[in-house]
Amino acid sequence: SGLEFNAQRRAVLDYHVRETERLAADVKAGKAARPDFVLWPENSSDIDPFVYPDARMVIDQAARAIGVPISVGSVVERDGRLLNEQILWDPVKGPVQTYDKRQIQPFGEYLPLRSLLRAINKDWTSMVRQDFSRGTEPGVFTIDGAKVGLATCYEAAFDWAVRDTVTDGAQMISVPSNNATFDRSEMTYQQLAMSRIRAVEHSRTVTVPVTSGVSAVIMPDGRITQKTGMFTPAYLVQKVPLRSSETPATELGIAPEMALVLVAAGGLGWAIGAGVRGRRAEDA
């Protein structure tokens, strides 16, 4: 509150750096186990580190402090395209892998029917000044032999966006999110519930790093083993299982749903046909 937009973005980035450095200090003091990698939320660095040296410097600083790769949520512009991107940041090599969000949010990340809305009311187009572009490839980061699938925020609501990370080899799933816009509403808990479903659906650990909370660690059976409060600086460190097996939901995808739709459509068609035949019989 009270900060202009770019200052807000830098403040958010600095918060994530500060908390990571606090974790590093606790690891050094023996108060916390050293993680194999660190997962930051969506929009943890809305300052593009590929363009702005100050952002790159502090992310490097955090990665060197903890000594392991960090998955950084950023907004980048590449080849004229605006992308909601996760960047795997190595403490020695810097950025080594990226994932661009594929299922972008209408009215949040792009404006549907922009020209029509502009014709009706020019002020409406200020909600989203520039549309984000969609990524095209599933996001699976390979970190020290572990494969971490990425479904950024809104993507957790879509079966395909989570499933194809698992079919692409993900042994666990991360849902980096930014729920700050929704303040203290129930939305963050709704999204957490979606992530619990995904954990059970694919029998995978799911981590939910969220800019404003609730961040959580979810076991493959859907149990939440750790979570933070909302708008509370915190880190979570936990040993979690990695799995390579596939559940029936992973293997079959939407096939059972399509089969049920076809059965329902067939039943409806039969009922309509039976009604028509009955009326014709009565007329005869």
Image: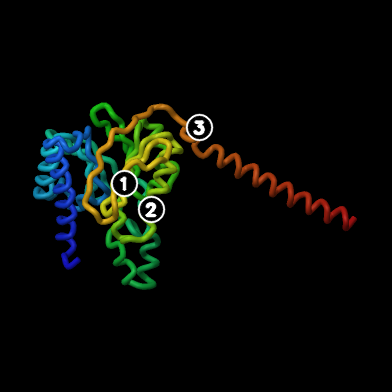
Residue depicted at x 31% and y 35%: 148
Residue placed most toward the observer, 3 or 134: 3
Report the mark closest to the observer, 3 or 1.
1
Q: Are marks 2 and 1 in contact (CB under 8 Å)?
A: no
Q: Where does label 3 land, which residue?
A: 248
**What residue do we see at 49% from left, 37% from top?**
253
Does residue 220 appear left or right of residue 26 in this picture? right
Task: Give the residue pinned by disc 1.
Answer: 227
Residue 54 in the image, given as x and y percentages of width and height: 9, 50
Q: Position of residue 50 (x, y in %)?
A: 15, 45
On the image, which quarter does residue 125 sit in?
bottom left
Name the residue beneath numbered marker 2.
Answer: 189
Name the residue rendered at 38%, 49% in the picture: 192
Residue 210 x %, y %? 29, 50
Label located before the other in sequence (2 or 1): 2
Q: In this rendering, does residue 159 appear at all?
A: yes
Q: Secondary structure at mark 3?
A: helix
- Of mark 3 and mark 1, the one earlier in the sequence is 1
Mark 1 neighbour class, 10 Å CA radius: few under 14, some 14 to 19, many 20 or more: some
Q: Residue furthest right?
A: 284
The amino acid on which the numbered mark 2 sits, given as a three-letter code, is Tyr
User: Is 164 or 230 nearer to us in this picture?
Assistant: 230
